[in-house]
Image (cartoon, rainbow, N blue to C red):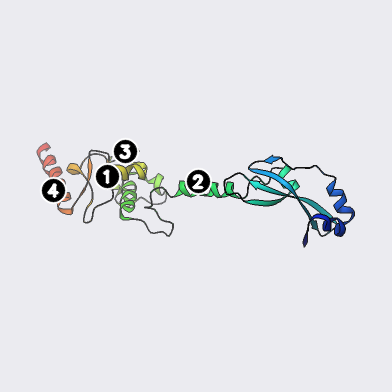
């Protein structure tokens, strides 16, 4: 348990312990990180007959906020702001994690993101997806040499190139041949996709 005591009352209550603390360095005017010391703010008295000097500081973040900080926290670099540095760090971390809004933390994914994942599962080597299980569709795609271009291993770039999946359409390769890459893939209806598959069958028949 601790007691906050300030000014002359601190010297009366804490006695010799406070007098010892007053003999410490005067930090008035010093700057630590974003904190500039304005004046002394008394002492913090701890159970066990110990006390620590307190300082009133102003933060330079623009909020004008003032905070009371223990002397040792300032001098050891444990406190450098009113809390704004931590808030700014959390904003940066959050911005880094939420990049496109299609893979959601509640486990629900947009249709576009699910299509992209399914494309990768069909084409990536099984040991890169799940070493214990060959993904569904692998033998018809990755097993036959169909690959996903390196650019589309990044969902944001896949989304930039194709846009969100339109209602009633699915991912399809032109002629139902070649890799998943820009210029060879589009959003097609089931009818359009069947037409592309028919082109492939005709091409194979002619080659035979």
Drawn side of residue 38 relative to residue 151, left or right: right
Q: Label 4, secondary structure: give it.
A: helix
Residue displayed at 18% across by 52% down:
189
- Cα gap from disc 2 to disc 1, whole angstroms: 28 Å
User: Mark 2 or mark 3, which has the lower sequence index?
Assistant: 2
Q: Where residue 85 sits: x, y (%)? A: 58, 46
Drawn side of residue 79 relative to residue 159, left or right: right
Q: Where residue 52 sits: x, y (%)? A: 79, 51
- Please state, as top left, top right, bottom left or bottom right, where the N terminus lies in the image: bottom right
Crowd band around label 1 with a 10 angstrom C-alpha radius: few (<14), some (14–19), many (20+): some
Residue displayed at 17% across by 42% down:
175
- Please state, as top left, top right, bottom left or bottom right, where the C terminus lies in the image: top left
Which residue carries the number 2 mark? 92
Q: In which quarter of the image is residue 107?
A: bottom left
- Cα gap from disc 1 to disc 4, whole angstroms: 20 Å
Task: Point out which mark residue 57 bears.
Answer: none
Which residue carries the number 4 mark? 195
User: Mark 2 or mark 1, which has the lower sequence index?
Assistant: 2
Q: Where residue 97 sits: x, y (%)? A: 46, 48
Which residue carries the number 1 mark? 162
Which of discs 3 and 1 lies nearer the camera? The answer is: 1
- Cα gap from disc 3 to disc 4, whole angstroms: 24 Å
Q: Quadrant of residue 147?
A: top left
């Amino acid at each position: 348990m601790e007691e906050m005591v300030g000014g002359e009352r601190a010297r009366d209550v804490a006695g010799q312990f406070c007098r010892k603390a007053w003999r410490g360095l005067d930090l008035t005017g010093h700057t630590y990180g974003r904190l500039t010391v304005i004046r002394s703010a008394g002492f913090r008295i701890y159970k066990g007959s110990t006390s620590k000097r307190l300082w009133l500081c102003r933060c330079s973040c623009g909020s004008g906020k003032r905070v009371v900080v223990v002397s040792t926290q300032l001098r050891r670099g444990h406190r450098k702001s009113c809390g704004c540095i931590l808030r700014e760090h959390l904003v940066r971390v959050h911005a880094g994690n939420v990049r496109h809004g299609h893979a959601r933390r509640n486990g629900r994914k947009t249709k576009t993101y699910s299509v992209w994942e399914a494309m990768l599962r069909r084409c990536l080597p099984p040991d890169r997806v799940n070493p214990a299980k060959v993904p569904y569709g692998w033998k018809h795609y990755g097993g036959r040499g169909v690959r996903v271009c390196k650019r589309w291993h990044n969902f944001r770039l896949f989304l930039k190139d194709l846009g969100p999946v339109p209602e009633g359409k699915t991912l399809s390769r032109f002629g139902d041949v070649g890799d998943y890459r820009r210029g060879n893939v589009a959003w097609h209806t089931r009818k359009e996709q069947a037409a592309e598959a028919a082109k492939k069958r005709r091409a194979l028949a002619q080659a035979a």
